[in-house]
Amino acid sequence: MLIMVVALASAFVTTLWRLQRAQAELAVLRQETGYLEPSDEGEIAAVRLPSDLPMTYRVRVRVPDWPPYRVAYSTDWRQSKTSPSWFAAVPLSPGESIVQVQVLRDPQDERWKITTLRRSPEGTRRMATVLPADQVPIFSSPREWLRSGVSNQTTTVAAGKTLRLLDERVLVGEGAMMLYGDRPPSDDMVGIFADLQPDVGPL
């Protein structure tokens, strides 16, 4: 009986250790790949994914069947406006998608652009917009950034609402360090902005 009790205790301890180790490895894996936690049918959800490339941002999103959703993007936020001046938007498929927003010099024509790419089971969709000429020197030289938007923890909001995915502001000028919260900026701002928004009406 004593030998059996010792054997059972040893087996329990070993199993518990293996379970804890597996849970720790799973947590690291989820951190590295961007795990999107389950959400209700009446919610949209997003989580930031790791990225090793400069000015490249990846987000995993989940949207319901209705209403339809899109990812609007821009690098331009005019003073006293409540949101950026959206350049364009990429439509999303219901379910999960990976959205990548990147600012880079296009090797095909050597022009600086902001690109937005959506990957989903239905396929890949990409859009690109040439940067305004006055923004090229800002993005092509080292700058300090004020980073916001969704984090590596799942963010959810009710379906039908808008979720700010990216709010990466370039710190330029004397008022660059000011935080505006819900107020519009008092000066023009340059950055990388992306919203997950209902695909209804104009941008």
Image (spheres, grey):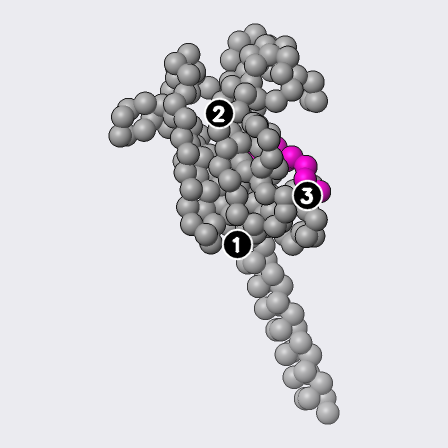
Front residue (pair 178, 116): 116
Indicate left or right for 165 with 127 as reference.
Answer: right
Q: Give the residue at the far left of this rendering.
A: 108
Q: How far across and how far down the image is residue 71, in percent?
A: 53, 36
Disc 3 is placed on an element classified as: loop
Tell me which segment is drawn in magenta: 158-166
Can you identify the residue that label 2 sits on?
87
In this rendering, would 180 be left or right of 97? right
Compute the Cα span from label 1 to label 2.
Answer: 35 Å
Tell me, for residue 108, which label it has, or none.
none
Question: SS at mark 2?
Answer: loop
The Cα–Cα distance between marks 3 and 2, rounded to whole angstroms, is 23 Å
The residue nearer to you, when weighing 34 against 127, is: 127
Sequence-wise, the earlier of marks 1 and 2 is 1
Q: Nearer the viewer, mark 3 or mark 1?
A: 3
Specify which label sits upstream in the sequence, 3 or 1: 1
Query: Is residue 48 found inside the magenta-colored segment of the image?
Result: no
Upstream in sequence: badge 3 or badge 2: 2
Quadrant assignment for the C terminus: top right
Query: At label 1, which amino acid type do we have?
Result: Leu
How many marks are shown on the rendered structure?
Answer: 3
Q: Disc 1 or disc 2, which is closer to the eye?
A: 2
Is 135 drawn above or below residue 92 in the view shown? above
User: Could you give the CA–CA distance between mark 3 and mark 1, rounded to whole angstroms?
Assistant: 28 Å
List the residue tagged with mark 3. 159
Residue depicted at 65% across the width and 70% down the height? 16
At 63% from the left edge and 52% from the top edge, which residue is drawn?
37
Q: Is residue 49 above or below residue 171?
A: below
Q: Residue 167 lies in what quarter of the image?
A: top right
Q: Residue at x 68, y 46 (%)?
A: 43
Q: Is residue 31 visible?
A: no
